[in-house]
Image (cartoon, grey):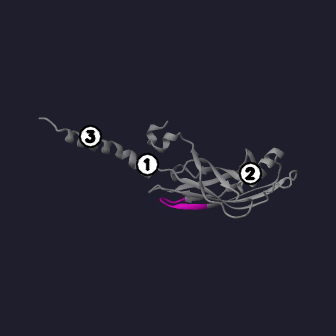
């Protein structure tokens, strides 16, 4: 009995669909939360007085979007730092929060510092960037600690960029964060039993 090429192709497509279905299901159920950050207010970031220490306050909204259909992602607390050119301008803590299954959550973060001294070259660079672009691009680094093994969340570290909007207290656009987790990158694709 001879099988036609179209039947072989159909059989191969069916076998491929069966082989890939656990991976597709795993990705749908275990997608990690996605994060973005938005600068909603800023005080004290003044480069006009070159020798004066800075007393800064940054209001940041961290947005967590959990695309998982069956499990919430809960974090007991976290730490956040606002940096420019590798220098920390302010720091703070996040509160305990959960992003429900298939839902999202906004988490307000207040990072502040008093008496931050920046080297003159860094202040000059910040002032030049503000003059040239009308804004200063900052980094927000966040570490989140998982609530527990059964919450579906993992300890997470993320790096986000936010813009000051020229030093005014106007909100910036939300920007996606680069997220790094405790497992290797393959953890987003491979089942748990494959990871050591």
In the displayed structure image, the side of residue 56 where residue 94 appears, left or right = left
Given residues 22 and 136, the one toward you in this image is 136
Neighbor class of circle 1 (other Cα within 10 Å; few <14, some 14-19, many 20+) is some
Residue projecting furthest to the right: 51
Apparent side of residue 31 relative to residue 21 in the rendered image (left or right): right
What's the CA distance linking mark 2 and mark 1? Answer: 41 Å
Q: Foreground mark, 2 or 1?
A: 2
Q: Quadrant of the N terminus?
A: top left
Residue 67: x %, y % from top left: 48, 56
Q: Magenta part of the protein: which range? A: 99-106
* Picture coordinates of residue 58, whole percent (x, y): 72, 58
Q: Residue at x 46, y 50 (%)?
A: 30
**Total count of labels:** 3
Q: Earlier in the sequence, mark 2 or mark 1?
A: 1
Q: Which residue is mark 1?
A: 27
How many other residues sit within 10 Å of disc 3, few (<14), some (14-19) or many (≥20)? few
Question: Quick one: SS at disc 1?
Answer: helix
At 83% from the left and 49% from the top, the residue drawn is 117
Instruction: Give the distance between the C-alpha atoms of the residues marked 3 and 1, in whole angstroms.
Output: 23 Å
Taking the spot 77% from the left edge, 50% from the top edge, the residue there is 128
- Residue at coordinates 16% horizontally, 37% vertically from top-left? 3
Is 10 part of what is drawn in magenta?
A: no
- Find numbered disc 2 in the image and state the secondary structure of the residue it sits on: helix
Q: In what element is the residue under mark 3?
A: helix
- Residue denoted by label 2: 129
Q: Which residue is mark 3?
A: 12
């Amino acid at each position: 009995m001879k099988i036609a090429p179209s039947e072989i192709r159909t059989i191969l497509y069916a076998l491929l669909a069966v082989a890939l279905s656990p991976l597709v299901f795993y990705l749908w159920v275990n997608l990690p939360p996605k994060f973005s950050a938005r600068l909603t207010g800023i005080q004290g970031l003044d480069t006009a007085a070159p020798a004066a220490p800075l007393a800064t306050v940054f209001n940041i909204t961290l947005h967590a979007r959990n695309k998982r259909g069956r499990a919430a992602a809960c974090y007991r607390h976290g730490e956040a730092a606002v940096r420019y050119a590798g220098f920390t301008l302010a720091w703070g803590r996040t509160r305990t929060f959960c992003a429900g299954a298939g839902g999202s959550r906004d988490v307000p973060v207040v990072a502040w510092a008093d008496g931050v001294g920046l080297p003159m070259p860094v202040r000059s660079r910040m002032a030049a960037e503000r003059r040239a672009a009308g804004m200063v691009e900052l980094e927000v680094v966040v570490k989140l600690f998982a609530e527990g093994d059964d919450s579906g969340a993992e300890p997470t570290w993320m790096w986000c960029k936010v813009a000051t909007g020229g030093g005014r207290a106007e909100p910036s656009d939300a920007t996606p964060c680069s997220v790094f987790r405790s497992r290797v990158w393959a953890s987003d694709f491979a089942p748990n039993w494959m990871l050591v």
